Image (cartoon, grey):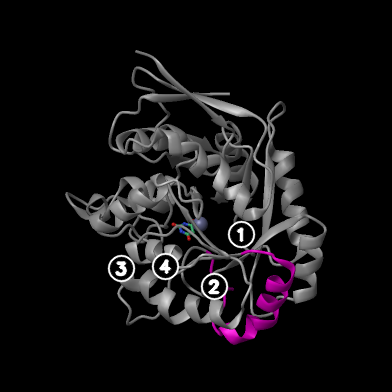
């Protein structure tokens, strides 16, 4: 029996597009299915000012193949030198939709991130005043904190204090990976949302480490134990509007992944929607898929739901390329480890 599902065209509320040849190769993978995406600013050097965000936006639009429609929603990379007035101007012009907080050293290209949270207080206060969301990479970076505990410790030591001292600050906890993250969101009614990636709904830490190390399953925050994956699946499929899709699709070349010190990131843009349909089907929650991919994010960001639609059709196994060819080298597409049965058409 053929089963079809038509939903409002999705958005991706956390995406890495990079620049140059990599941007040109990965952008169509997202634009094929998604209308908009929140674009991460962790380029080298990072996108710090409104002028840099405007230039990056122009490069993204120039890289978009003819006939494809896509709106990049730009972000600024928060540093200890960020000027609150520059942030406010970039937000008020409509260019910038969020500011991204990376604790220094937490992940790929985060060296310019924040060490002393008191030094960004004026920016956070300005953001609370104008209603501009803060997207947070929620991991502490202390050497003595186990990598599997870094999200939970961040919530207690950094996120909760920031939220208490900055009333009205709107926060997106990015790519949550723990039951602790889910519970923290649920315990707070206002001004708090969370994105969940596709891959964290599918893999736990065994997938990375059992039977040989799997570099293409390594990302940050690293996948946790099974009980956390189950908590994420329950949150994503619950219909709770505080949870929405941010794929964190993060391309790195195979040469940079399959090496003694491999980069963090899973590239999921290509097959994300097929995987999600299957996850939601397994959870008997296909009627909640549209909320997660297409409605909850716009509601949080105060943007309209997209007018276009996509249609998902269940049928024979769908084949996706195993790799994307880019001018910088091959990029492996995330392998969910099971056959995919939902195909996507515009
Ligand atoms: O796995 C990740 N990759 N996590 C991040 O936070 C950054 C990203 C990247 O830029 O590759
Ligand atoms: Zn990311």
**Viewer-nearest of labels 1 and 4?**
4
Question: Residue 268 in the image: x percent, y percent?
Answer: 45, 42
First reached walking from the N terminus: tag 4 or tag 2:
2
Q: Residues within 10 Å of mark 2 (few under 14, many from 20)?
A: some
Question: Residue 31 in the image: x percent, y percent?
Answer: 61, 35
Which residue has dot 1 on it? 43
- Under circle 3, the secondary element is helix
Q: How many marks?
A: 4
Mark pair 3, 4: CA separation: 17 Å
What stretch of residues is rendered in magenta?
A: 109-133
First reached walking from the N terminus: tag 3 or tag 1:
1
Is the C terminus in the top left, top right, bottom left or bottom right quadrant? Answer: top right
Towards the viewer: 118 or 321: 118
Mark pair 4, 2: CA separation: 27 Å
Is 204 contained in the magenta span?
no
Towards the viewer: 124 or 211: 124
Position of residue 118 relative to residue 328, above or below, is below
Mark pair 3, 2: CA separation: 21 Å
Verify CB contact (< 8 Å) between mark 3 and mark 4: no
First reached walking from the N terminus: tag 2 or tag 1:
1
Q: Residue at x 36, y 53 (%)?
A: 232
Which residue has dot 2 on it? 111
Mark pair 2, 1: CA separation: 11 Å
**Viewer-nearest of labels 3 and 1?**
3
């Amino acid at each position: 029996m053929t089963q079809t599902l038509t939903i409002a065209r999705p958005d991706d509320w956390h995406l890495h597009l990079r620049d140059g040849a990599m941007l040109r190769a990965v952008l169509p993978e997202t634009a094929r299915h998604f209308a908009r995406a929140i674009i991460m600013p962790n380029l080298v050097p990072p996108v710090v000012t409104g002028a840099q965000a405007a230039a990056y936006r122009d490069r993204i639009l120039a890289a978009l193949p003819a006939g494809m429609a896509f709106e990049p929603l730009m972000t600024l990379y928060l540093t200890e030198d960020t000027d609150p007035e520059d942030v406010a101007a970039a937000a008020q012009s409509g260019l910038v939709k969020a500011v991204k907080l990376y604790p220094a050293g937490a992940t790929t290209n985060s060296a310019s991130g924040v060490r002393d949270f008191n030094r960004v207080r004026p920016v956070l206060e300005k953001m609370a005043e104008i209603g501009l969301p803060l997207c947070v990479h929620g991991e502490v970076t202390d050497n003595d904190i186990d990598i599997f505990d870094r999200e939970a410790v961040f919530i207690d030591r950094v996120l909760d204090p920031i939220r208490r001292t900055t009333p009205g600050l709107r926060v997106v906890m990015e790519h949550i990976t723990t039951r602790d993250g889910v519970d923290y969101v649920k315990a707070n009614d206002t001004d708090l949302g969370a994105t969940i990636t596709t891959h964290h709904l599918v893999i736990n830490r065994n997938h990375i480490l059992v039977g040989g190390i799997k570099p293409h399953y390594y990302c940050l925050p690293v996948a946790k134990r099974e009980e956390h994956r189950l908590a994420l699946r329950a949150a994503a499929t619950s219909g709770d509007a505080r949870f929405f899709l941010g794929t964190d699709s993060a391309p790195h070349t195979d040469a940079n992944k399959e090496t003694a010190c491999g980069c963090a990131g899973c590239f999921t843009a290509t097959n994300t929607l097929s995987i999600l349909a299957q996850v939601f089907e397994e959870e008997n929650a296909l009627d909640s898929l549209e909320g997660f991919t297409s409605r909850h994010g716009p509601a949080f960001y105060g943007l309209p739901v997209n007018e276009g639609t996509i249609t998902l059709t269940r049928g024979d196994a769908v084949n996706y390329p195993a790799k994307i060819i880019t001018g910088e080298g091959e990029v492996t597409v995330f392998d969910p480890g099971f056959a995919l049965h939902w195909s996507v058409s515009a």
